[in-house]
Image (cartoon, rainbow, N blue to C red):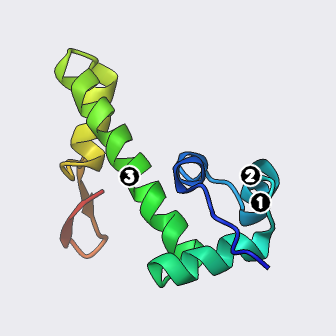
């Protein structure tokens, strides 16, 4: 029986999204086992590991686009990027007085 080739360009395009191995197999008209076997043979990793790498690429592209839009003046995305990529946060300082006269300061 001849070895079935796997169209990695098509697989990689699918794996930019949160799809299952079964979905990929159906779309590529091959079996789930063939996909799993080829990834193991060609890349020495599981389908989940290979999929995670492709999703990292998607995440990077989305971050680049969000930064581009933020730098272009999109205020909502600018705040989002600062909070999520630059680790900024909205901190509120509150002072509470305990009955014994002790003052507590904490940040929310």
Q: Which quadrant would the N terminus be assigned to in this image?
A: bottom right
Q: Is residue 38 above or below residue 69?
A: below
Secondary structure of the residue carrying tag 3 is helix
Residue 79 in sight from this viewpoint = no
**Which residue is at 20% across, 16% downward?**
72
The circle on residue 28 is 2
Q: Nearer the observer, disc 2 or disc 3?
A: 2
* Circle 2/circle 3 CB separation < 8 Å: no
**Which residue is at 31% across, 31% downward?**
65
Judging depth in this view, the residue of 83 and 95 nearest the camera is 83
Q: Which residue is denoted by mark 3 in the rendering?
A: 57
Residue 98, given in percent of the width and then of the height, sits at 29, 69
Residue 101, given in percent of the width and then of the height, sits at 20, 71
Q: Earlier in the sequence, mark 2 or mark 3?
A: 2
Find the distance from the CA under tag 2 to the CA under tag 3: 21 Å
Find the distance from the CA under tag 2 to the CA under tag 1: 5 Å
Q: Earlier in the sequence, mark 1 or mark 3?
A: 1
Residue 63 in sight from this viewpoint = yes
**Which residue is at 49% across, 66% downward?**
52
Residue 63, given in percent of the width and then of the height, sits at 31, 41
* Circle 1/circle 3 CB separation < 8 Å: no
Find the distance from the CA under tag 1 to the CA under tag 3: 21 Å
Q: Which residue is denoted by mark 1 in the rendering?
A: 25
Judging depth in this view, the residue of 59 and 79 nearest the camera is 59
Based on the displayed image, in which of its 4 quarters is residue 34 positioned? bottom right
Q: Residues within 10 Å of mark 1 (few under 14, many from 20)?
A: some
* Circle 2/circle 1 CB separation < 8 Å: yes
Q: Which quadrant would the C terminus be assigned to in this image?
A: bottom left
The circle on residue 105 is none
Secondary structure of the residue carrying tag 1 is helix
Secondary structure of the residue carrying tag 2 is helix
């Amino acid at each position: 029986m001849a070895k079935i080739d796997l169209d990695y360009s098509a697989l990689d395009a699918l794996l930019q999204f949160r799809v299952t191995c079964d979905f990929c197999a159906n779309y590529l008209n091959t079996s789930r086992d063939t996909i799993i076997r080829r990834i193991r043979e060609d890349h020495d990793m599981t389908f989940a590991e290979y999929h995670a790498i492709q999703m990292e690429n998607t995440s990077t592209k989305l971050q680049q686009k969000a930064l581009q839009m933020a730098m272009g003046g999109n205020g909502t995305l600018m705040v989002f990027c600062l909070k999520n990529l630059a680790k900024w946060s909205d901190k509120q300082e509150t002072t509470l007085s305990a009955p014994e006269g002790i003052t507590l300061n904490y940040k929310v």
